[in-house]
Image: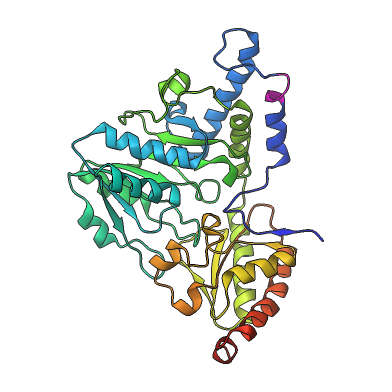
Amino acid sequence: MDRVYLDNNATTRLLPEVLDAMIPFMTGDFGNPSSMHAMGRAPARALAAARRAVQQLIGAEAESEIVFTSGGSEADATAIRSALAADPARREIVTSTVEHAAVLGLCDHLERHEGIKVHRIGVDAEGRLDIDAYRAALSPRVALVTLMWANNETGTIFPVEGLAELAHGVGALFHTDAVQAVGKVPVSVRGTDIDMLSMSAHKLHGPKGAGALYLRKGVPFQPLIRGGKQERGRRAGTENIPAIAGFGRAAELALEVDHVAMRLLRDRLEQGILARIPKARVLGDLRDRLPNTSCIAFDFAEGEAILMLLDRAGICVSSGAACASGSMEPSHVIRAMKVPFTAAHGAIRFSLSRETTAAEIDRVIEALPPIVAQLRALSPFGAEEVQ
């Protein structure tokens, strides 16, 4: 039985075209792109081509604004630490309660061990940022605002362009973790006040181990990894050319994604589930979400159990965020949205890709209702409550 894979916000399948772009740099063209001899030339050309492809994907003004990293987490850490180093007199950061662990974990560390004040802005029941609280947190003491473009669990999109403009109003830099947005919705930084943006190849059918930080021209910068002069002195270490070449090809292919078709399949999934399963609710902003993401909470059913039974049926999904798997507690995103207790433990994330088919969606719609019914029958109060 073929598996249905609906956990694409965790990682995506490497496309064959991407693998084809990577293989030459694992075999014949294995040279160091910094080398002056012939064996370094093909890797250097691949590095430049990938940089241009990523630049085009996010609408950056210049290819020099793209700094390759090992992934989104490194890009996040680089942006945050660089902003703090740029103006040591500013000792505050503004973020949200629903950021990825790559941002929240570092902010927690900076607060506990380095004396940085962190403002964590809450969200409403649909995962939308509290704009009034955000405005109140901004001041000349803030070095950086770091807010995600789109949430990895619910798909809710933040209005980052306007948020960046407000940050610049108090002289703060603005960074957005766009790991989940790039390749799924049109992203363009040109003409905005976004100073830095993080992205990751494996979220858009590229390889793991490659990411990038967009760094707007003229923004003060301090590298996280020092040493050699790679990446124009902004990220030391020999570049991972096979992965970066794959990232570049994935970026080119991402421009061809039919976002409307993906959204229609997502809607088909939601409508089918809600029509067949009572006491189910879609979490997030229904008007402004990623087209591939659906987080559905089922009252009186344990999310981890749903996940395991779906897995037995050949269907791969996520209980909350992949980084929170293994925990019986609702994720920090679910808690921040104040989802009722009866539903919070039953949240399942379905995340589609360009490869998802209608037949796969229909298979999920057929498999899920008996699973939820089975679990509710085992609950001490679930079977009666859903009647």
Magenta stretch: residue 270 in it? Answer: no
When the figure is inspected, residue 269 is found, relative to residue 49, above or below; the finding is below
Segment colored magenta: 24-28
Q: Assign the N terminus to one quadrant of the image.
A: bottom right
Residue shown at 47%/42% (left/top)?
73
Q: Left or right of 307: which side holds 211?
A: left
Does 2 sit above or below residue 245? Answer: below
Location of residue 328 in the rendering, given as x and y in whole percent from the top left corner: 52, 67
Q: Which x, y percent locates residue 203?
A: 57, 46
Asked if residue 226 is positioned above or below residue 214 in the image, the reply reads: above
Split into 4 quadrants, where in the image is the C terminus?
Answer: bottom right
Q: Quadrant of residue 36?
A: top right
Could you tell me which residue is drawn at 64 percent across and 28 percent down?
A: 242
Q: Nearer the viewer, residue 184 or 322?
A: 322
In which quarter of the view is residue 77 placed? top left
Q: Is residue 25 magenta?
A: yes
> Camera-side residue: 157 or 371?
371
Can you say whether 92 is above or below 248 in the image? below
Most foreground residue, 327 or 177: 327
Q: Main structural element of the magenta stretch: helix, strand or loop?
A: loop
Which residue is the extreme one toward the top?
A: 37
